[in-house]
Amino acid sequence: MKRGIKYMIWIGFIILLLSLLLKIYHDTNYFKVKTLMITSDQIQENQSISILHLTDLHNKQFDEQNQRLLNKIKSLQTDIIVITGDVIDRDTEQMDDVLSFIEKVAAFNPDTYYVTGNHEWGNPLREKFFEGILKSGVHYLDNKNAAIEINNVLFQLAGIGDSSTGHSDMEAALRGLDDRYFTILLAHAPEVIVNHYPQKVDLTLSGHTHGGQIRLPFIGAVIAPGQGLFPEYDQGLFQINEQQQLYIDSGLGTSTLDIRLFNQSQMTLITVKGENG
C-alpha cells in the first residue's frame, strides 16, 4: 500500500515537473498580442489611434530572422509603432539580425519610434548599434518629441533616453509640448516616471521589468530591476492620478535567464479612443 502511494506521488511530481517545463517553453518562445483600450477627452469621441508597443526584445528570435514576429506586426497594421528599449542585450555581439528586424518594422510603418534601454547603453558595441538605428528608418526619440497627425487626430509623442543609466532629459523631451493635445511619453524604465510624473504627460509607455519574467499565481512578479522583490509596478496599466496613466509591458524577450513562467512573451496593441469631456 505504501509503495503504491509513493508511486502515485512520484507520478504526480513528474507530471507537475513536465507541465511546468512545457509552460516555461511556451511562455518563453510563443508570444501573444495583448489588447488595451485607453480613453481620452482630448480626442474627439468618434476618433481613435492604434499603437503597437514593443519592448525588451533582447535579441530574441521567434523563428529564423524573427519572421513569425514580423508577420504578426505587419498583419496588425497599426497607426504607429513604438519601441521602448532593450532591443539588444548587453552582451549581444551580432547586430545584423536585430538591425535587419528594426529596418523591416520601419518599412512596414514609417511612423515607428524608438527610445533606448539600459542594455543598449551597457553593450560595448553600442556605437555600432546606434549607427544602425539611425540608418534603419525609425525615429530616434531619446529626449525629443514630435507632433503627429493620423486619421485627423493630432497628438504628441515624447521620449526619454534610459533613466536607469542616466541618459534621460525630461526637460528636453517635453520642451514645446502643447497641453491641449493628448501626449504619450516613451520611457524604458517606469519607476522614475512614477516618482516624478510630468503634468504634460497623459500616458507613459514603459518596459524594463519583464513583468518579473517569473510570476507566481495570485502573487505576481517575484523580482524586477530597480524595485527588488515583489515589485508594485511590475506590469499592466496603473492610474497615477485622475488624468495620467502608466502602462508597463512585460515585453518579448528575456535577460539573465532565458525563462518566462506564467508571464508569456507579448507585445501590446493599444487603442486610444476619444470620449466626451
Image: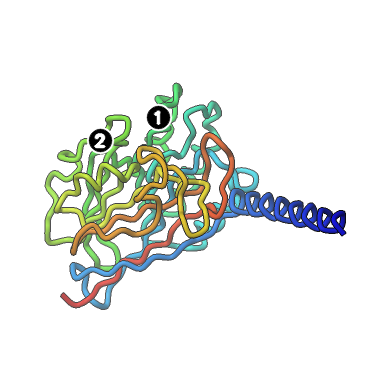
Q: Residue 91 — which label?
A: none
Where disc 2 sits, the SS reads: loop
The one of 226 and 105 positioned closer to us in this rendering: 226
Upstream in sequence: badge 2 or badge 1:
1
Q: Residue 168 — which label?
A: 2
Q: Position of residue 85 (x, y in %)?
A: 39, 41
Q: Which residue is mark 1?
A: 131
Where disc 1 sits, the SS reads: helix
Whole-Å distance between the Cαs marked 2 and 1? 19 Å
Q: Position of residue 121 (x, y in %)?
A: 38, 29
Eyeballing the image, is 151 above or below 212? below
Amino acid type indicated by mark 1: Glu
Check the image and tell me how it is coloured. rainbow
The one of 158 and 237 positioned closer to us in this rendering: 237
The nearer-to-camera label among 2 and 1 is 2
Neighbours of disc 1 within 10 Å: few (<14), some (14-19), many (20+): few
Residue pushed farthest front?
Answer: 1
The C terminus is located in which quarter? bottom left
Measuring 56% from the left and 47% from the top, which residue is drawn there? 260
Amino acid type indicated by mark 2: Ser
The one of 277 and 9 positioned closer to us in this rendering: 9
Q: Position of residue 39 (x, y in %)?
A: 27, 69
Eyeballing the image, is 180 above or below 121? below
